[in-house]
Amino acid sequence: MPSSVFSLEKRLFSPAVSAVDAVPLIFAFPNEYSVGITSLGYQVVWSILAQRADIEVSRLFTDVRESLPASAELMGFSLSWELDYVNVLDLLEDQHIPLRAQARTGAHPLVFGGGPVLTANPEPFAAFFDVILLGDGETLLHDFLDEYHRVRHADRSAQLKALAQVPGVYVPELYAVTYVDSSGPIASISPIDDDVPAIVKKQTYRGNVLSASTVVTEKAAWENIFMVEVVRSCPEMCRFCLASYLTLPFRAASIEASLMPAIERGLKATKRLGLLGASITQHPEFELLLDYLNQPQYDDVRLSMSSVRTNTVNQKLAETLVTHGSKSITIAIESGSQKVRDIINKKLDTDEIKVAAQQAKSGGLTSLKLYGMAGVPGEDEEDLAQTAALIIELKKQVPGLRLTLGCSTFVPKSHTPFQWYGVNPQADKRLKFLRKQLKPCGIDFRPESYSWSVIQALISRGDRRLADLLELTRGYGDTLGSYRRAFKALKGTLPPLDFYVHELWPLDQVLPWDHLEGPLPKATLVNHLAEARTHMVTSRQILSG
């Protein structure tokens, strides 16, 4: 029974009692409950909504739901995986809401969305949302809701124009996009009226109290885990990395004001703790955090960590993980080639990778998981050979330590220096090369689907013309073949698949997100790209510009 799922939750906050005239709001996660309730972002936004007396929030997932209002005024989505757009459309239909924003009237709720996918590049999904929130929700969500209350009883058009004045609130229908031709690049993006901001700027929360779980449940994908955000963004700034560039600046949670109180609160509800962040071991007081967790009263706490920086792996870290029930640690090396690591600004040398493996074993860990990438701009076959050679050498140097290499295909991301590059069509062959080299050596090689990388690139560099394609593909399925079939059906109305996925875009080309300002200006990204190109001595890909 759905009600039993919600009854198993241990809530770590106190919801407000809704006021008589509270705004009825549906907050949806476009996937199953076990997935959505594991999302720290979804948890935090839900708790913010639930603690406002002027909002009456009900949760909706693809498999379960709370009691929903008969006439919701707002419907929000948290989108953290690109292909979940299918479920967004399904849930809109379920609530009898037109899929396209332009087809909605005052009788329908305003549909808003946020999360990493929409903040990075909302344009492929722009037709489906009335409002998109760009950036961190800590203050942006309150600003949005406060303004909605001010214009709550205005007509829909007036509401949207007023909301568009709030920094970080993007109303897609108030911006006109023109194209060089139907199958060419964008010619211009401009507001439809003078009183609409020309540029929408992503909002950044700059406090030192970061996010922590607001609910713990055995029905989460990570059962009974309490998650705490140790850092936000990453100081390394690898040139392909959306998690670093889009979330700048790097922020560390205060040990005393954020981490310790949150951990103490969470461990009253569970004995499983997860430390989150793109580079948690680069917290300036990480050693102090380890000392705190190594106190005797926490001996029975099971601890897990997201990927850590390779050159911060030491025996103390490994021993702490072992003491708290972990057998493995994860590091991102990206490549065994120093040239490639220089291209992407991965501040790491080969000896540091070897030391990390040795320290992991010395500290008692039995498994080391490494992340790599194929098809990086400037990479050649020799670089792949060096990756295979390094992993094989690690296997020999640290016998008994189980090695796993997870490897993805490079996918261009908006607001990064590599946003102008396409997916290397040779990447699939390079993944197969690595498998052939590593499998006979007893190394667990786990490549990410190349086909999924193609779809991811399509969406990450897509523009508004993809709305028709996404709707069509929804009926065909989620395979690469389904997307190719949809492109064929829509031929002449949008560029071919290769334009979005594989082509190297000129530096002067208008990008779909040029009217959406990230943390760094475009000129800075061009400079970072130029630095990368100085290392591409054997690259066959030359970016025009």
Image: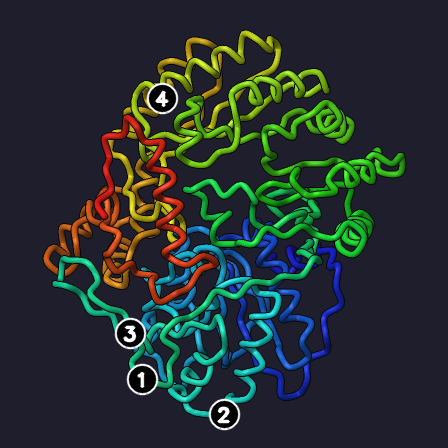
What type is the residue that disc 1 sits on?
Asp
Callout 2: SS: loop
Identify the residue position indicated by label 3 in the image: 190
Nearest to viewer (mark 2 / mark 1): 1
Residue 289 in the image: x percent, y percent? 77, 41
Residue at x-position 32% and y-position 71%: 100
Q: Residue furthest left?
A: 492
Answer with the quarter of the image where residue 374 lies. top left
Which of the two labelled residues, at mark 2 and mark 1, occupies the earlier sequence position? 2
Disc 2 target residue: 153
Task: Name the amino acid, label 3.
Answer: Ser
Q: Are marks 2 and 1 in contact (CB under 8 Å)?
A: no
> What amino acid is found at the position of numbered circle 2 in the picture?
His
Instruction: Identify the mark nearer the N-term, 3 or 2.
Output: 2
Residue 104 located left or right of residue 58: left
Relative image position of residue 198 (x, y in whole percent): 36, 75
Instruction: Kindly identify the residue that appears in the image at 51 percent across and 79 percent down.
Output: 72
Distance from the alpha carbon under mark 2 to that under mark 4: 61 Å
Distance in Å between CA atoms under marks 3 and 2: 28 Å
Mark closer to the chain start, 2 or 4: 2
Which residue is disc 1 drawn over?
193
**Depth check, front residue: 396 or 126:** 396
Snapshot colouring: rainbow
CA separation, marks 2 and 1? 22 Å
The vertical placement of 154 against 17, above or below, is below
* Residue position for label 4: 383
Towards the viewer: 187 or 162: 187
Q: Which mark is first along the chain, 1 or 4?
A: 1
Q: Position of residue 12 (x, y in %)?
A: 75, 59
Label 3 with label 4: CB-CB less than 8 Å: no
